[in-house]
Amino acid sequence: MNGDPIAIRVRGLEKRFGDLVAVDHVDLDVPKSSVYGFLGPNGSGKSTTIRMLCGLLTPSAGEIEVLGLRIPEQSETLRRRIGYMTQKFSLFDDLSVRENLEFLAAVQDIDKRHARARIDELIVQYDFADRQKQLAGTMSGGQKQRLALAGAVIHEPELLFLDEPTSAVDPESRRDFWEKLFDLADAGTTLLVSTHYMDEAERCHRIAILDRGRLMADGTPKDLTDALRGRSFVVHAAQPRRAQQVLVALPGVLSVAQIGNSLRVLCDHADDAVPRLRAALATANLEADVEAGEPGLEDVFVAATGAHAQAQAERAA
């Protein structure tokens, strides 16, 4: 085993498709035995980055080291040590639960005796004891998700990549799935999970926010939200829609979102924000109260991606 506490180390990673820069000089350090989240909208470069880390896609520039191996040069060696699960579950609908696992064990070249014992273990661990003969095509989305995860870890990988793995399942299945992920992390597996769900990102030990191919923020959820303390506010207004229209046009306001009957406001800095918000509302003859709020990951995302958009606009001007 490599004694390095970092499972993935990336420096200056770039991927171009013609004139399109899909991944733009990304640096990453992913600690071992952790759940590391990639947060970003569709098209932000999450899937492209994961494919390069797996050795499935050759980078245009940069250096990648995964589990002590140079990628893509040592990709074949790496593939025996990693698992990969996508949002399109890699299952055969006309095979049973057990037959799917047997096939995946054969693909991983696991000897039959070991495969039989490993499948028995996974059948119990992933709650398929009474469904071993059920065809995968007849299962619910959550059941298919669990089976796909069982298949992705059948060879006991040291590192598991999960690319938007919960996008097609219900909230309860998502919650149960994440419990399985933490079981894997507790057992020593490193997990890199891409998602666009804020509540999932909050579960991760550490997250990276990607936007248009660039790494905009990286840290623990707490560290990232603490960095915005003093810039998030709650506005209680009798007419929240009108108040939102007033505040969103105010210089220094990055976002205004309605939550129930209140507004959540994020500003670019904390200095004199409260009196400026109050003055703008009063000028519009709106009764409202402004108080400090607790920043969340949505605020972190807006602040990070908003800064990127502003920098691009300034460069274009």
Image (cartoon, grey):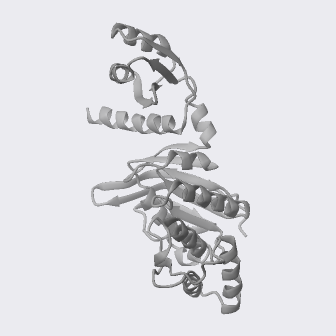
Residue at (71, 78) in percent of width and height? 121
Residue 178 place in picture, x, y as percent: 61, 57
Q: Is residue 118 above or below residue 50?
A: below
Residue 220 place in picture, x, y as percent: 62, 43
Q: Residue furthest bottom?
A: 112
In this rendering, position of residue 18 left or right of residue 1? left
Quadrant the C terminus occupies: top left
Labels in figure, total: 0
Residue 25 place in picture, x, y as percent: 44, 51
In this rendering, position of residue 146 left or right of residue 51? right
In this rendering, position of residue 145 left or right of residue 222? left
Residue 272 place in picture, x, y as percent: 49, 13
Residue 71 appears anywhere in the view:
no
Quadrant the N terminus occupies: bottom right
Residue at (47, 81) in percent of width and height? 92
Name the foreground residue: 264 vs 2.
264
Q: Is residue 58 above or below residue 173?
A: below
User: In terms of image quadrants, where is residue 158?
Assistant: bottom right
Q: Is residue 248 above or below residue 166?
A: above
Residue 42 appears anywhere in the view:
yes
Name the foreground residue: 100 vs 131.
131
User: In terms of image quadrants, where is residue 176?
Assistant: bottom right
Residue at (51, 60) in percent of width and height? 63
Residue at (64, 72) in percent of width and height? 157
Q: Is residue 79 above or below residue 141?
A: below
